Amino acid sequence: MWVNFSDIPDNGLRLELRESPQDIQLEIDEIRVSGHLEFKGRLDRLEKDVIVRGNLNTTVDVVCARCLENFQLPVSSPVEVEYRLRVERPQEEEIELIEEDADVYYYTQDRLNLEEALRDQILLAVLLKPLCLTDCKGLCPGCGANLNQGACGCPQENVDPRLEALKAFRRGREE
């Protein structure tokens, strides 16, 4: 997903990309792009900087944080990032980043690689704990059965596991 800086006219460039899932590597085992990645947007030049604005759509395979089942999650995310020309300069001891630096990417020579920014937008769009259903019941703590598929048959005790020691203590006193 390379764009040449010199191909962006002064009045901007409309860009539509469609990449196959095999071409996108997220570098995270639990998330895999399963649908075509589509980006429709605009690239605008500001001297040596480029502003990328648009919308990203794809589908990713993720694992539910409660029931551990794989499911497909549609991702639709606005994209607004900035590319700056990387100028080689002597290495400083410390560089303080500010909030605006979070959406800044760098390019060298005359080529911008949009893949890293789009990959980051996908990762930001996926929740830290994705759920297959908003009311996912998760797994039974006793036998590990998926409670979304029905009750498991384990006895239902509504005792907080942190209080088990008190329950055992009480049983010992009653004997």
Image: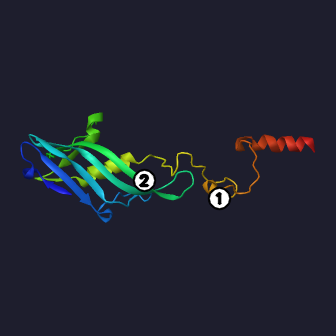
Q: Nearer the viewer, residue 13 or 63?
A: 13
Rendered position, 116 above or below 82: below
Asked whether, in this view, residue 123 is left or right of residue 174, the answer is left
Asked whether, in this view, residue 33 is left or right of residue 166, the answer is left
Q: Is residue 31 visible?
A: no
Split into 4 quadrants, where in the image is the C terminus? top right
Q: Which residue is mark 2?
A: 73
Mark seen at residue 145 = 1
**Residue 40 in picture, x, y percent from top left:** 23, 50
Q: Nearer the viewer, residue 40 or 1?
A: 40
Question: What's the residue type where badge 1 is placed?
Answer: Ala
- N-term mark: 2 or 1: 2
Q: Secondary structure at mark 2?
A: strand
Question: What's the residue type where badge 2 is placed?
Answer: Leu
Q: Mark 2, residues whose alpha carbon is within 10 Å: few (<14), some, or many (≥20)?
A: many
Rendered position, 114 above or below 93: below
**Residue 147 in picture, x, y percent from top left:** 63, 54
| Image point (34%, 50%), residue name | 122
